Amino acid sequence: MSVYKPCDIRGPVGELSPALYHQWGQALAGAIEPGDTVVVGGDVRCSSPEFRAAFIAGARKQAVRVVDLGTVPTPLVHFVQRYCQAALAAMVTASHSPPDINGLKWTLRGRPPTEAQVQALETGTALETGTDLFFGGAAGDRVTVSFGAAAPPDVDADRGHDHDTATRPNEGAAVRQEGAAMRQEGAAVRQDSAASGQRDDATEKEAVAAAVRQEGAAVRQEGAAVRQEGAAMRQEGAAVRQDSAASGQRDDATEKEAVAAAVRSDDGARLPPDAGTTVAEDPTGEYARWLVERWADSGVTLRVVVDPGNGCWSGLAADLLRRVFPRSTVVVIHDRRDGLFSDRSPDSARPEHLRALAAAVRRAPADLGVAFDGDGDRIALVDDTGCCLSAEEAIWVLLHSFGGEWRGRLFVHDIKLSRRIPVAVEQYGGRTRAERSGHAFLRNSMLDHGALFGAEISGHYFYDELAGGDDALFTACRVISYLARSGLSLSRLRRRTPSVHLTGDLRVAVPPAAHQDILDGVAARYAGHPLDYIDGVRVSWPQGWALVRSSVTAPQLTFRFEGDTPEWLDRLVRQFAGGLGAWEEPLLRQYEQDRAAREAAAS
């Protein structure tokens, strides 16, 4: 399978390289204006520092200002992008995938990747420019922000929102004035050239040839330096991986210095005069101040267990929660950054990966357990009895946390979500919209339709107040605040969730060449039923629904079913499988395994 996915780039480290990241950095930064800000971070994977440095070096070729955040959770990259109104934010990560996988996620002008952008990176063609979320156009004046001791005046006055910076209009006027002067100068040059009417061809050709020879020598020299830098970067990456395997952790300060050195080596001696710049920033302090102002409640006295799972929130999440809820008790497990994820899988969506968290909640005893995935943008919840909440149960709790805010507002949800859950929004007077599975599709739908809240069953939760983005620690604060405000335990809220009879994803290996024929056959077979083509084909009955879609990560078809009762669910699955010919038996095997797992979890 290609590393180029519909929503991002992801694949085995052996299929990636610093050269590719350099290329992607240059291409993405080329889609914004010179002088714009690019925010870059990376996760804890052993390969991420090397890849992040290469991405930064590529972006700097486009004369942009790069803010290197180092190893940080993805939500901090998005926070800095909102804070700086940066034109581009990029995160070197494979999210919840195993440690031998890596990838790249980005937002361009506040928008997540489109399939066209991913395809452009694959083919090396120019990227679409799109619409600027922060400034309302294809390009806009940018604000420069430093995360030093003093914050910009507008942020101190109204932190936690998207700001208009008082200095930006003046700065923009100066930029536009300079641009006008440059255009005027260019016009004068062209006019002068036209007036002369002729040039000495021989002299011109010799001058051009000399310039070409000179440029060629410079390019060859630059290429040699780049190759030398690439070898140094690969050597550095190998050393980092070896050190991580031996100790299970890295010193962030040392890592940042290594990356900074790699970026500095790509200096002005080899870059064109208009090359970009790189600054290293630590956004943690400003992020903490924003989080405290948004959620701080000294009256909350809950006991919370946090499981960063060796990922990006390690060493950060527990401290931040203590600052937001100073009278609460926060216990932390798996709090050591480790690119090998030695303590548990970076995938927090699977209950079998949360057994240590559930045991710690029972042992404390605690009111709540929260777990994060590898890059820190997905969250899983464990209640006060040590029970892992399903996606539907977690979303149910979050839906109710908004209460009366729902009137007239929209809830965007993954098409795979149980149809019973959006009923809560409708009862509050809100509206619902199903969307194609995938982080980028959900977030784009949030932005396009001005939704209040959005949810993907993998644990991504999106908020209007985050410019349609997601933040797992922000979600943890919302849940803690809601538990304290409601006076109800999480287990009691969980038990109020309507009964859901829904399979997990049933994955059947099917050659990609056969996918469309199977989808077309399903649509033809159930032509008399309500059909939805948002993502694959979804067939609805009064008693439930069936969904079949192509996997974006493997040569598989993914099936999911829901029934009003266990009996209806079983009947729908067997009826649907009966029309799949050679794929009936593999699907039924997956269904039986899924049913056994669900029964074991319920016992």
Image (cartoon, grey):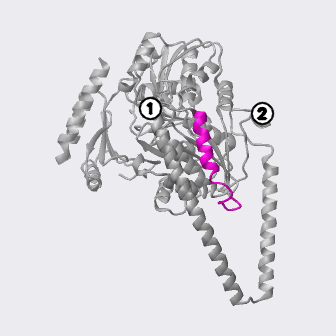
Amino acid on which disc 1 is placed: Ala
**In the displayed structure image, the side of residue 434 where residue 255 appears, left or right:** right
Which amino acid, mark 2? Ala
Q: Which residues are magenta?
A: 252-274
Residue 63 quadrant: bottom right
Magenta stretch contains residue 268: yes
Taking the magenta stretch, the answer to whether it contains residue 503 is no
Which disc, if any, is residue 150? 2
Task: Specify the label residue 519 is tagged with.
Answer: none
Badge 1 element: helix
Return the x and y of residue 60 as percentages of the image width and height: 63, 54
Q: Which residue is mark 1?
A: 246
Q: Quadrant of the C terminus?
A: top left
**495 to 540, vertically: above or below:** above
Image spot of residue 102 (x, y percent): 45, 44
Foreground residue among 359 and 204: 204
What residue is shown at x 80% (from left), y 61% (from top)? 178
| Nearer-N-terminus badge (1/2) | 2
Quarter of the view holding residue 183: bottom right
Q: Is residue 307 above or below residue 193?
A: above
566 or 457: nearer the viewer = 457
Percent of width and height locating residue 601: 31, 21
Residue drawn at point x = 51 percent, y = 63 percent: 125
| Residue 523 shown left or right of residue 53 in the figure | left
Of the pair 182 and 467, the residue shown nearer to us: 182
Mark 2: which secondary structure? loop
Q: Nearer the viewer, mark 1 or mark 2?
A: 1
Circle 2 residues within 10 Å: few <14, some 14–19, many ≥20: few
The answer to whether residue 255 is visible is yes
Q: Residue, x 28% and y 21% (percent of image)? A: 600
- Tell me which corner region of the image, top left, top right, bottom left or bottom right, holds residue 28: bottom right
> Does the CB distance between marks 1 and 2 fall below 8 Å?
no
